[in-house]
Each structure stands twice: as C-alpha cells, then as structure tokens.
Image (cartoon, helix red, strand yellow):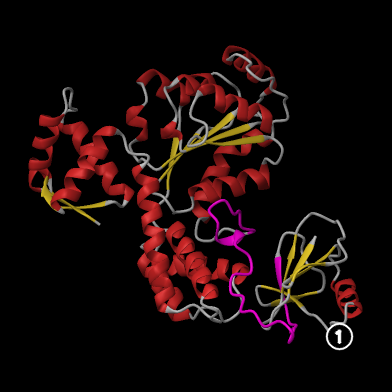
Amino acid sequence: MIVCFAREIPLRIFVTGDMTWTGEFIDVRSIRLPFKSPSRISRVLRELSFDTEIDFYSGGTRLAEPHPRKILDTRIRFPNMKDSIILLNEEPLAEVFIPTRLLHRDGQLREILSYLRPALHGRDARNVLVVGGPGIGKTTLVRWLLHEYFDGKFAYVNCLNARSEHKILESILIQLGNAVPENKPTDSLIQTFSKKVNKRVVVCLDEVDQVKGDRVLQTLSAQECGLILISNRLYFLDSVEDRLRSRLFLTEVEFPRYRRSELIDIIQDRIDYALSPGAITKHLVEIVAIWANGDARIALQTLKSAAMNAESGKRDSISIEDLKNGIKGAKRSKFEYVRSKLNEHQAFLLRQIQADMKIESAELFRRYQESFDNPVGERAYRNQMNQLVQTGLVRGEGEGRWRKFEVV
C-alpha cells in the first residue's frame, strides 16, 4: 500500500506490502493507493484532481520504479493543505525500526556474519555474544542481519519482555511456525524445541542479562541451532557459570560508541525518511549528535520529540528550544530504562553517588559494605562500578582507591 501525505511541502510516498484499495481519503493528510508504478500513481492522482506530474526519489536519485522497501520522495505540492507537518513517518525514529542499509557497522556485520554463515549451509555456526552500551546499533544490526540472511529460519526474543525459560521457548517455537498449546509444561516445550530446531536455525536473545537463571542457556547450549546473545554488560560472561560458559563457547563482538561524524550520518539518514524536507538545519543535526554523545537511541528520540513539539506549536521547522525539550525527555527515558536493569548492588551504589553528586571510590565501597549483609568483594565491586560507568549514568575519573565517581 502506498500512503501519500498531502501538505504544502514536497509529498512523500510510503510503500508497504498491503495492496488493499480504499479509494477514499483516510484523513485530510493521506490518500491510500495500491500501486507501485510511478506512472499509475500519477494517473490516479490526476483522476483525483491533483493535476501534476510526480517524480520519485530515493536518497536524491530519481527512480524509474519505486523499490517496495524504500520510502520515496516526490516533487508535488498541495496548495489546499494548510496544516504544518514535520513528522511524516515516526517509524524510522523508533527503536524497533530496521533500516534498509546499515551505516558505520561494516566491520561488526562482516565478523558476525562470518560466524553464522555456516548455518546457511547446514553446518555448525559459532555462537556469538554481542556487547556494548545502549544506543550503539547492536540490536539494529543483528535484526537486520537475521532478516536479510535467515528470513523464516530465526527467532528473536527480547528478554525484557520474556525472562523465564518457558516464555522464551514459547516465543521461539511460535516464531518458527509451531503451535504452542496453552499451559504446556516447560519440559514439553524443551522436547518440541529439540525436535524442531536444526543447524540452519539461529536464535537471538536480546537483553540476555535479564534472563532469570541459567537454565534456558543450558537448554540452548545443548541444541544444534546457532545462538546470538546481546548484552549491554561488557562483563556479562563473568556472571555465567564456568561449565556453561565452556558449553556455549561464545565469540565476543564488542560495539564501540558512535563517533560524532558517524552519528550525524545516521541521524541524517533517518531524517530523510522521517521528516519533511527543510524541517531541521544541518547545524541543529550536529547539535543533536553532540548532545547524544554517541548514543543513536537518544538522538532519534530527541528528534522525534522535537518534531512533535514543533508541530504542536504549528511551526514549519524544528528550533533549538524544541531540541532542548526533546533531549531532556530522551535522557530521562534512557535513565529510567537503564536503571530498571540494575541489580540491587548497582542500584544502591547509584543512589549513593546521586546523593553526594561526587564521591571517592573508597568511601563508596565502605558505605556499600556497611549496608549489605553479604556484600561482594573489592574486585567484584570494581566490576559493578565499571558496569555502571558503561551505562552512561555515572562517570569515573582516576585510578584505584582514589578513583572518584559522579553523576553524568
């Protein structure tokens, strides 16, 4: 289905798979058409009294035929439409959006694909652990790779939404096309899973550090399928029992933060799909990249919020004030998201740092030991603090006992 957004600035046409013809206006801003041919779209619009020629573009290049997976610019004006529309399509700014191309992750893509490629030929794939902070493209890359190379032969589970072994196995089986009766025992799910999966199947557990216990990892390690685990914690493997770690035999792929120039490219790419032309200046895009500090999730949430704020104010473009309001909401959202994933030790340490704003490591460790009946040792404490720093909630400076921590 092609959705035409009518407004005073150049129209965009969104191509999706639904070919149902509605033959009517859905609202004052949209018309639905079932055609993917530029000439047929032009003819239908002319029949609807929009007497103008339409050219289709993608990334600045004129297309003879639209690609069904792309969002295409057109050069057409509707002078009867008065409302200011900035946010044409929210989807490219959403966390779950899978882009048609990946930017600045070529090395990680080649590496992960090299480990999984044997599964395409029915051979043993190498299990992969993808690690790095939030908002740096881990989930986007893995989901893109699975859809491109293993379509119909993979299962993706976000363990924030399915933390138990039963829920995870149930989700995997359903995604692989298996009916799962209600209240089926977990042991029965394991038996079904063992029969259904093979070396051509790849299973991905995102937010794997949220899984309750190790049993589901033990189950998966005993199967023939390829396995991808995604975690924000660089020290995730430290929490896995030695024997299980050996059975999983995970190859670690680390994702660094985006550089500012890389983040600008990503932001601009999504803007081309999501916002109206001229909705934001290049200078403001650079400001978003600076404020996001390598986190694409924050950058995209900021843009979405800023665009909505500008629209509600009936403005034709995004201002610096819109961005300021947007970044506040994006950072608050990230804080709540990351804080929800902290264990009780990390949550206590974060509260202490917030209370003092800045605190020496030795004093923080002393308070921690006094507050827990079974506190972890000094080495484990340092690992907990390293993980807190990696979340971006706190900043560390200095070394050893003289190191200081402060709220970002």
Q: Where is residue 315 in the image (x, y as percent from the top left)?
A: 53, 81
180 lies left or right of 124 = right
Q: How many labels does the image show?
A: 1
Image height of 315 relative to 206, above or below:
below
Which of the 4 quarters of the picture holds residue 4? bottom right
- Tell me if residue 95 is in the magenta stretch: yes
Q: Which of 276 and 245 is in front in this view?
A: 276
Q: Position of residue 179 (x, y in %)?
A: 73, 24
Return the residue at label 1.
Answer: 51
| Residue positioned 55% across, 45% down in the render | 142
Q: Which of 125 and 344 is in front in this view?
A: 344
344 lies left or right of 381 = right
Which of the 4 quarters of the picture holds residue 340? top left
Image height of 135 relative to 220, above or below:
below
Look at the image and tell me in which quarter the N terminus lies. Answer: bottom right
Q: Position of residue 205 (x, y in %)?
A: 52, 34
| Residue positioned 18% across, 23% down in the render | 374
Q: Where is residue 271 in the image (x, y as percent from the top left)?
A: 56, 70
Q: Which amino acid does label 1 sit on?
A: Asp
Q: Nearer the viewer, residue 372 or 68?
A: 372
SS class, disc 1: loop
Is residue 388 in view? yes
Magenta residues (range): 71-100
- Tell me if residue 89 is in the magenta stretch: yes
Prevailing secondary structure class for the magenta stretch in the rendered image: loop
381 lies left or right of 64 = left
Look at the image and tell me in which quarter the C terminus lies. Answer: bottom left
150 lies left or right of 252 = right
Is residue 294 in view? no
